[in-house]
Amino acid sequence: WEKWLLEWYSDGDRHKGEAELLAHMINVTAGHSFSEELLSHPQYKRLSGLINKVCCKLSSYQKDKVDSNCSHNITSHANYYVTTPEIESAMQELVQLILHNSEDNIHSDIKQTFLAIAKSFYYAAYCDHGTINFHIAKVLFDRVV
């Protein structure tokens, strides 16, 4: 919390680092311990940076899509352009980092949390509220055969 609050206070952007904060909160709640060694591990730092980058781009894309009802191919935000291929590329890099079997000593459940958050942001950015509500209702209330 402290890191996120300090960045929010200094930059004024409450969404900066939001995905990393979510991942950290979910992992702590799930019982994973976070040592200084893990938090300073290059692979963990890379995961944190990528999740923030991907989710920030997806949030900007979603906001602009709603605000200007723009096409799915390109959106402008804060004087720069975020293209769908740019988002896809960053998402692919994140997925490869998470699924790559390496000797980084980062528990696979921790990595999977990063992936679940990225998928949630992706889903919210590309699906309208009606589709999301329909899927939620289907999962919660339809009988499984």
Image (cartoon, rainbow, N blue to C red):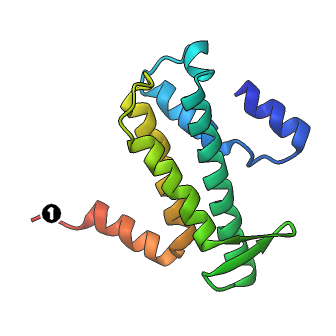
Q: Residue at x 35, y 35 (%)?
A: 101
Q: Is 145 placed left or right of 18 in the picture? A: left
Q: On the picture, is 7 further left or further right than 22?
A: right
Residue 73 lies, with reference to residue 93, above or below; the image says below
Write the residue at 37% across / 32% down: 108
Amino acid on which disc 1 is placed: Val
Residue 5 visible to an observer of this rendering:
yes
Query: On the rendered image, what quadrant is the C terminus found in?
Result: bottom left
The image quarter containing residue 104 is: top left
* Residue 13 falls left or right of residue 36: right
Occupied quadrant, residue 139: bottom left
Which residue lies at the image location 39% right of the left edge and 31% below the top edge?
102
Residue under label 1, please give it: 144
Q: Position of residue 53 (x, y in %)?
A: 66, 51
78 to 65, vertically: above or below: above
Camera-side residue of 107 and 30: 107
Outermost residue to the left? 145
Question: Can residue 116 be seen at all in this image of the molecule?
Answer: no
- Near-viewer residue (109 or 68): 109
Of residues 118 and 68, the one drawn nearer to the viewer in this rendering: 118
The crowd level at tag 1 (other Cα within 10 Å; few <14, some 14-19, many 20+) is few
Please provide percent x and percent y for residue 120.
49, 56
**Drawn side of residue 26 relative to residue 36, left or right:** left
Locate residue 79, reporting x and y percent. Answer: 87, 69
Q: How many marks?
A: 1
Q: Residue at x 60, y 27 (%)?
A: 42
Q: Is residue 115 above or below residue 70?
A: above
Q: Provide residue 119's location: percent of width, then percent of height.
A: 47, 56
Circle 1 SS class: loop
Quadrant location of the N terminus in the rendered image: top right
Up-down relation of residue 100 to residue 5 (above or below): below
